[in-house]
Amino acid sequence: MNVSNCPNCNSEDYVKSGVIKNRQRYKCKSCNYFFTVNKIGKKIDDYYVNKALQLYLEGLTYREIERILGISHVSIMNWVKKYNIKRPYNTNYHPTYKILNAQELSTFFSNSLNLKGAGTIVTELGDKFMLIKWERFRE
């Protein structure tokens, strides 16, 4: 099989670097990344990567995101490190979330008491919607 570019930096400057388990190994001259042609492993859709990072920035923990999206919390930690995501630090607010379908969401917003508070965000989550609301901690 023919290699077109490095999967790490997309460079076309690479050399052969041995054979491992009957598969040709290559080394990128630009970033020193070792790779093979038929990389084994599953790739998670970019939609879920973006959604996990968005939820992380909204204040949810790795384990909460794992329960919502069904993706390992370790994968989420690796993405946060890879993309150098920094969460704003503010201890006065605590996010709570609910997963609702379209009917439940319209019922939620029809009650005016649900519109008061620190802030609310609605994001699509497959065929449902996730509602994230911030509440101030009572002192």
Image (cartoon, rainbow, N blue to C red):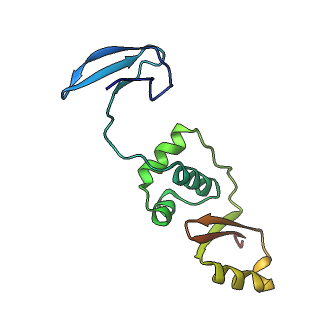
Query: Residue 53, image x and y in percent?
Result: 58, 51
| Residue at x 18% of width, y 27% of height | 22
Looking at the image, residue 78 sits to the left or right of residue 136; the answer is left
Give whichever of 114, 42 is nearer the camera: 42
Q: Judge whether 23 appears above or below 70 on screen.
A: above
Q: Quadrant of residue 100?
A: bottom right
Query: Residue 71, image x and y in percent?
Result: 43, 57
Image quarter hosting the N terminus? top left
Q: Judge whether 137 appears above or below 63 on screen.
A: below
Image quarter hosting the C terminus? bottom right
| Residue at x 35% of width, y 23% of height | 2
| Residue at x 48% of width, y 47% of height | 77
Q: Quadrant of residue 111?
A: bottom right
Give whichever of 74, 42 is nearer the camera: 42
Give whichever of 36, 118 is nearer the camera: 36
Furthest residue in direction front, as rendered: 1
| Residue at x 44% of width, y 54% of height | 73
Q: Judge whether 52 appears above or below 85 on screen.
A: below
Looking at the image, residue 71 sits to the left or right of residue 128; the answer is left
